[in-house]
Image (cartoon, rainbow, N blue to C red):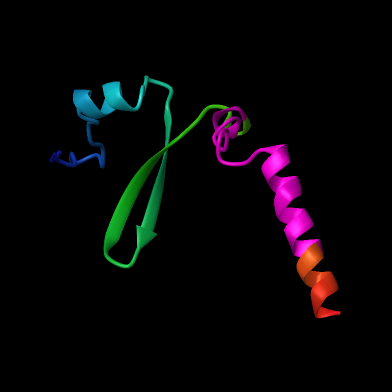
Amino acid sequence: MRTTVSSRGQTAVPAEVRRRFKLTGNSRLEWIIEGDVITLVPVPADPARAFRGSLRGKYSVAALLRQRARERKRERQRG
């Protein structure tokens, strides 16, 4: 997708992008510059709430306890 920058330095966010990322008139965007590349990232209104639950299913208390038990066993074997 392409947009044009106006003489006032403004550009429009295409409707497809607004729908996909649920951007509204008050949405905030972060501009990240790395060398010659510009990346535009939507910033959630409440970043903590947006992050909440993002690791669900990846880690469980039981899995973490099993991993810790394996680490302790290896430490004992090494001496």
**Residue drawn 81% across the image and 74% down it:** 77
The C terminus sits in image quarter:
bottom right
- Residue range (magenta): 49-72
* Residue 72 in picture, x, y percent from top left: 81, 63
Give the quadrant of residue 61: top right
Give the vertical position of 45 relative to 9 (above or below): above
* Residue 71 in picture, x, y percent from top left: 75, 63
Looking at the picture, tell me which residue is in the foreground, 18 or 20: 20
* Residue 52 in picture, x, y percent from top left: 60, 31
Looking at the picture, tell me which residue is in the foreground, 12 or 6: 12
Give the quadrant of residue 34: bottom left
The answer to whether residue 50 is magenta is yes
Q: How many marks?
A: 0
The N terminus sits in image quarter:
top left
**Residue drawn 81% across the image and 71% down it:** 75
The answer to whether residue 77 is magenta is no
Residue at the far bottom in the pictured view: 79
**Residue drawn 71% across the image and 47% down it:** 64
47 on left or right of 8? right
